[in-house]
Image (spheres, rainbow, N blue to C red):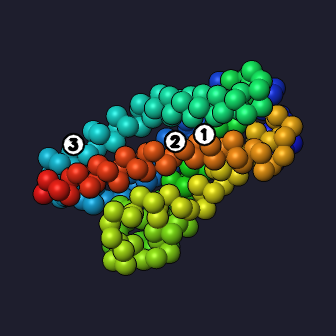
C-alpha cells in the first residue's frame, strides 16, 4: 500500500480520475439499473418508474462532476488540516490523489452491494437501505432499532474503515509522519466533516418527523 501511495507522485491525475469515474458509473448502474427494483424507491406506477429511469440516467451522466467536486472539497479540508498541523504548505495535487484513492473503496461498496443483492440475498426485503458489512445490516435493519439511527449504523462499515485507513496511511507515507499522527489529521478534518453531515441528517429527520 505504501509503495502504491508513493507512486501517486508520478501518476497521471486525469487518467486516474477517469478510471475511478468509470468504475463509479459501473457501480451505480449495477446498483440502480440492475439489482435494485425501481418500486423500492418510487412505487410501481409506470409514470414514476419512467421518472426513476430518467433520474438515474442523469445521475450516471453527472456523477463524474459530482465525484470530482466531492473529492475536491474533502481534499481541500484535509490539506488545510495538514498545513495547520505540520506547519507546511502541502501540495493539493497529492492530497487530492490520496482522497481519490480512498474513494475507490466507496465505488467497490456499490459493486459489492449490487452483487450481494443479485446473488447472495436476491429476495431481500430491505434492499433500498441495505449496506454490506455494516452495523445496520449486522443488526438486522430498522426492525431492531429506531430509523433515526440508520445513517450512523450504515456509515459504520468495512468500506468506511478502509476509506479512513487509506487516508491515514496516505498522509503518513507522503508527509513522513507517524500513522497515529496521520490518523489524527484525518479525524480532525474528514471526521469532523462526516460528523457535521450526520448531525444535519439527524436534525433534518427530526424536523420532518415533527411536521408529519
Q: Quadrant of residue 102?
A: top right
Q: Earlier in the sequence, mark 3 or mark 1?
A: 3
Q: Secondary structure at mark 2?
A: helix
Q: Is residue 171 left or right of residue 134?
A: right
Which of these two is toward me, 123 or 65? 65
Residue 189's disc number: 1
Give me the residue at 81% from left, 28% from top. 9
Across and down, in percent, residue 58 comes to: 34, 34
Give the distance between the C-alpha atoms of the residues marked 2 and 1, in whole angstroms.
6 Å
Q: Which mark is residue 193?
A: 2
Q: Is residue 110 above or below residue 147?
A: above
In percent of the image, x 52 and y 66: which residue is there?
Answer: 134
| Position of the C terminus by quadrant | bottom left
Q: Earlier in the sequence, mark 3 or mark 2?
A: 3
Read off the residue under disc 3.
Answer: 51
Question: Vertical placement of 76 versus 104: above or below?
Answer: above
> Quarter of the image holding residue 37?
bottom left
Q: Residues within 10 Å of mark 3 (few under 14, many from 20)?
A: few
* Element class at badge 3: helix
Q: Residue at x 84, y 46 (%)?
A: 178
User: Could you say which is closer to the camera, residue 27 or residue 207?
Assistant: 207
Task: Tell me whether the residue at label 2 lies in contact with that at label 1, contact meaning CB atoms closer than 8 angstroms.
Answer: yes
Comparing 207 with 18, the one in front is 207
**Can you give x and y, in whole percent of width and height, for residue 100 in the image?**
64, 37
Residue at left offset 74%, top offset 21%: 89
Q: Is residue 97 visible?
A: no
Horizontal and vertical percent position of residue 126: 35, 69
Amino acid at each position: 500500500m505504501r509503495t502504491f501511495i508513493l507512486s501517486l507522485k508520478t501518476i497521471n491525475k486525469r487518467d486516474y480520475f477517469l478510471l475511478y469515474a468509470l468504475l463509479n458509473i459501473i457501480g451505480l448502474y449495477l446498483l440502480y439499473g440492475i439489482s435494485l427494483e425501481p418500486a423500492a424507491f418510487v412505487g410501481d406506477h409506470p409514470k414514476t418508474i419512467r421518472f426513476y429511469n430518467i433520474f438515474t440516467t442523469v445521475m450516471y451522466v453527472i456523477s463524474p462532476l459530482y465525484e470530482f467536486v466531492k473529492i475536491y472539497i474533502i481534499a481541500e479540508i484535509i490539506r488545510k488540516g495538514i498545513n495547520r498541523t505540520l506547519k507546511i504548505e502541502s501540495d493539493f495535487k497529492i492530497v487530492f490523489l490520496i482522497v481519490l484513492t480512498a474513494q475507490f473503496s466507496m465505488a467497490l461498496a456499490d459493486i459489492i452491494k449490487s452483487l450481494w443483492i443479485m446473488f447472495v440475498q436476491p429476495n431481500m426485503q430491505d434492499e433500498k437501505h441495505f449496506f454490506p458489512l455494516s452495523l445496520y445490516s449486522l443488526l438486522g435493519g430498522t426492525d431492531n432499532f429506531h430509523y433515526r439511527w440508520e445513517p450512523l449504523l450504515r456509515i459504520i462499515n468495512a468500506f468506511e474503515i478502509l476509506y479512513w485507513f487509506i487516508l491515514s496511511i496516505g498522509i503518513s507515507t507522503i508527509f513522513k509522519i507517524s500513522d497515529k499522527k496521520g490518523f489524527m489529521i484525518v479525524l480532525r478534518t474528514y471526521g469532523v466533516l462526516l460528523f457535521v453531515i450526520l448531525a444535519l441528517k439527524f436534525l433534518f429527520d427530526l424536523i420532518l418527523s415533527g411536521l408529519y
